[in-house]
Image (tube, rainbow, N blue to C red):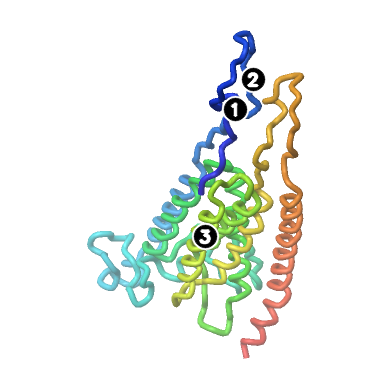
Amino acid sequence: MGKRSPPGDIESMSYDVRKPLSMPPPPSYYPPPPKPWFPWLVPLTFLANIAMFVFTLYENNCPAAIGGNRCLFYPELGRFSFQPFQENPLLGPSISTLKRYGALDKEAVVEHGEGWRLVSCMWLHAGVIHLLANMLSLLFIGIRLEQEFGFLKIGCLYVLSGFGGSLLSSLSINPSENPIISVGASGALFGLLGAMLSELITNWTIYSNKCAAFISLILIIALNLAVGFIPHIDNSAHIGGFVSGFLLGFILLIQPQFGYVNHKYIPAGADVKRKSKHKCYQYFLLIVALILLIFGYVSGLTRLYKTGPQVLESNTF
């Protein structure tokens, strides 16, 4: 998705016009291209997720819990071996271990006041396959976004999108079924995809190949959402994270319109008509997105804590 660079100086064009030799070169009114941010937060998040997965395997200690002969790859991995394939087909720790260290559990969140699980579940993964799929997506999407927008905006986007995904996931969990937990950074990653789409919309004027960028991004999002319909995949977390990231993109990733020049790059006394920094539709989308995001978070939390205990009590009979 290419973005337009400022047009070149009109005086550089080739015309057969003789100018006096004493004529000074015209001043340049275009700022230098912005330097990309150094991406350190996304790689650090990548390492933190891997470290947390290794920690859960260490604490799980499959051989001590159920016997080494039942654990996968026990001779090679020892204490870090995986649970039996029938219990965890993704090659990872047990459900009880994940729940102990912060997996999303609706009963714990609602009845025991453990709201921190709405965020902690983002740093846990069910297995090696789950971890690799999410971390490759994080590096592929996140590094480019951090280079362009910086660590603060992308960090807020990642955490708030993950929270939105966890919130919708907790509202979708049916406590009458077998104990269900949810883990993974998928909600946050879908938030990054949603933010890429809203960033394309709100910064439409600075893109050169608009249609190609839009179509390719829609195809990527559709393919990723389609994966959520595979059994045992928490698609509600994907949708919640995507919607949260989509709204956050209008708020955090807004950029100046094409042709805007900061006053510090205009020479003193130059007669230049400056464009406004942002277009009216950008401000409109920002305000609407902020209202919808706050309403969604507040209404979701209200529904979770208002109806949660009643649902759980009604299912005990």
Q: Secondary structure at mark 3?
A: helix
> Which dot marks residue 26?
2
Given the current orientation, which residue lies at the most extreme bottom position? Answer: 317
Q: Which residue is mark 1?
A: 9
Q: Earlier in the sequence, mark 1 or mark 3?
A: 1
> Which dot marks residue 215?
3
- Which label lies toward us, 1 or 3? 1
Quote the CA–CA distance across marks 1 and 2. Answer: 8 Å
Instruction: Say if mark 1 contacts mark 2, CB within 8 Å.
Output: yes
Instruction: Give the residue drawn at x 72%, y 50%.
Output: 282
Q: Considering the image in quadrants, where does the C terminus appear?
A: bottom right
Q: Secondary structure at mark 1?
A: loop
Instruction: Give the residue drawn at x 76%, y 24%.
Output: 271
Q: Position of residue 274 (x, y in %)?
A: 74, 33
- Up-down: is 17 above or below 218? above
- Up-down: is 247 above or below 63? above
Q: Position of residue 180 (x, y in %)?
A: 52, 76
Name the kind of residue labelled 3 in the image.
Ile
Instruction: Say if mark 1 contacts mark 3, CB within 8 Å.
Output: no
Name the kind of residue labelled 1 in the image.
Asp
- Up-down: is 65 above or below 286? below
Quote the CA–CA distance across marks 1 and 3. Answer: 32 Å
Q: Secondary structure at mark 2?
A: loop
- Which label lies toward us, 3 or 2? 2
Q: Could you say which is closer to the camera, residue 282 or residue 119? A: 282
Instruction: Give the residue drawn at x 32%, y 60%.
Output: 79
Q: Could you say which is closer to the camera, residue 105 or residue 192? A: 192
Quote the CA–CA distance across marks 3 and 2. Answer: 40 Å
Name the kind of residue labelled 2 in the image.
Pro
Instruction: Say if mark 3 contacts mark 2, CB within 8 Å.
Output: no
Determine which quarter of the picture holds residue 113: bottom right
